Amino acid sequence: MISSISAATSLAEIPNDIPTGKPLASIFGIRHLSPGGAVHLLDFLNKLKPKVVLIEGPSDANHLLPILVDSQTKPPISLLAYTEQRPVRSILYPLAN
């Protein structure tokens, strides 16, 4: 079960079971297809051992999430998003284990 805190409007809305003295979230930004960035991210995740990892992607690919997290889906995989109007713009979301 995944629990999350999203759009809390006041401190009273935040659950009481959050450990004090620890950051609520850690952010590790990757903006390109960097093998070095992937190595550093893996080291970061192994050290932090998070319970949940949020991966940003295109909102119109939400329907693909069940496929992406299915145990039969084997990384590396990627999502390609693109515009339909000219000039065509695209972005690649690579995902690896």
Image (cartoon, rainbow, N blue to C red):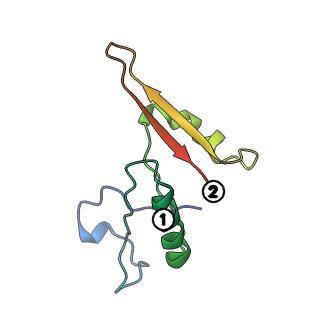
- As drawn, the residue found furthest toward the bottom would be 21
Mark number, residue 97? 2
Q: Name the side, left or right, on which 27 lies relative to 67.
A: left
The local secondary structure at tag 1 comes to: helix
Of labels 2 and 1, earlier in sequence is 1
Within the image, what quadrant is residue 1 found in?
bottom right
Looking at this view, name the residue that lies furthest to the right.
Answer: 72
Amino acid type, label 2: Asn
Rendering coords of residue 63 (x, y %)? 55, 34
Say which amino acid is labelled 1.
Answer: Leu
Where residue 50 sits: x, y (%)?
52, 71
* Quarter of the C terminus within the rendering: bottom right
Residue, x 76% and y 45% (percent of image)?
A: 72
Q: Secondary structure at mark 2?
A: loop
Q: Quadrant of residue 15?
A: bottom left
Q: Is residue 87 visible?
A: yes
The residues bearing labels 2 and 1 have C-alpha atoms spaced at a distance of 11 Å
**What is the number of the mark on residue 77?**
none
Label 1 packing within 10 angstroms: few (<14), some (14-19), many (20+):
some
Q: Is residue 50 visible?
A: no
Q: Residue furthest left?
A: 10
- Label 1: which residue? 41
Image location (x, y in percent) of residue 4: 44, 61
